[in-house]
Image (cartoon, rainbow, N blue to C red):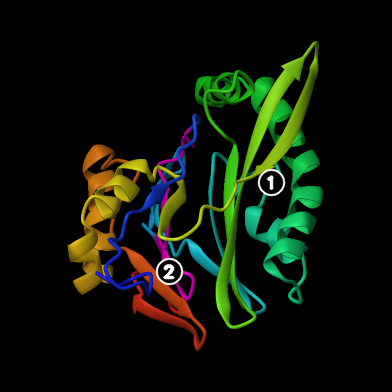
Amino acid sequence: MRLDGSAGRLLVFALVLTVTQNGTGTSIVVVKPNAGVLYLAADSLYGGKNGRLQFCKIHQLGHLYWAAATTFYKDPRGFYLEKLVTAVGPDNTVDSATTRFIKIAKNRIATELVSLGISRDKRDTADYADIVFGLRSPLEIVFVGIEDGKPRFQITRFFASRRKSQVFVTASREKIASPPSASGAGYWKNAASYIADRPSQFESNPGKTIGEGLETEISADPEHVGRPISIIRFDRNGAEWTERGTCDF
């Protein structure tokens, strides 16, 4: 296999595993088989308290793309993820977009968590407890772009804690592993492991392998992770959909 461009070298994926897991059911996977290619994939089901909805979870911001897993994507209390990302502005690198989003989002996440904590809805208070006690992240987001002819990405995971009566939110940029690597946001570890365990299949049919990887997340939580699956490939020529799913842009 020569996915990394080195003759005779096997494709051995690095899995960047994290302790926490996002609780919304969203499954986002980022696969970088070599320095020149990257795949971003997501399911399309949102299983929140407002019911089961389908929508495209891969979005565009100027020349960048982004996807996120969050406990509160669009909340009647005022939290609206797409508006927060739009406020970053269209003319950014992956790094500057990440930096600006962190600055914009931290206080808004903290405010939303305070609202959850005083809610009379048991689901809200359960989410609040899980998040402030570190059992899961309230928001994980990935930005992807082409820079200097190569795809680049950054995953950021937000964490919350409570001290006395105050909620504090911090952000952690995931360290980027050398390719080949697989990571993600939300529920992604089963999918990444599936992909990493099948290097020959990935080499011959990456889209099929990524799709089957996401199917493992659907099987694990069919109430919150579901079809159709969207997959977009990035290389020096730009972005190309291999599976559009519910995405129509």
In which quarter of the view is residue 170 placed?
A: top right
Q: Are marks 2 and 1 in contact (CB under 8 Å)?
A: no
How many marks overall? Answer: 2
From the viewer's perspective, tell me whether residue 202 is left or right of residue 108: left
Is residue 224 on the magenta stretch?
no
Q: Which residues are magenta?
A: 21-41
Which residue ends up furthest to the front in the rendered image?
Answer: 8
Q: Which residue in the structure is indicated by mark 2?
A: 34
The vertical placement of 235 against 107, above or below, is below
From the viewer's perspective, tell me whether residue 212 is left or right of residue 25: left
At x 58%, y 68%, the residue is 152
Specify the amino acid type for callout 2.
Asn
Q: Position of residue 179 (x, y in %)?
A: 45, 60
Q: Position of residue 88 (x, y in %)?
A: 77, 64
Q: Nearer the viewer, mark 2 or mark 1?
A: 2
From the viewer's perspective, tell me whether residue 152 is left or right of residue 208: right
Within 10 angstroms of label 2, few (less than 14), some, or many (20 or more) residues?
some
Q: Earlier in the sequence, mark 2 or mark 1?
A: 2
At x 52%, y 23%, the residue is 135
Is residue 23 on the magenta stretch?
yes
At x 80%, y 40%, the residue is 107
The vertical placement of 187 against 184, above or below, is above
Q: Which residue in the structure is indicated by mark 1?
A: 79
Specify the amino acid type for callout 1.
Phe
At x 70%, y 35%, the residue is 112
From the viewer's perspective, tell me whether residue 227 is left or right of residue 180: left
Q: Position of residue 151 (x, y in %)?
A: 54, 73
Distance from Cα at disc 2 to Cα at disc 1: 37 Å
Q: Position of residue 197 (x, y in %)?
A: 23, 50
Viewer-closest of 165 and 187: 187
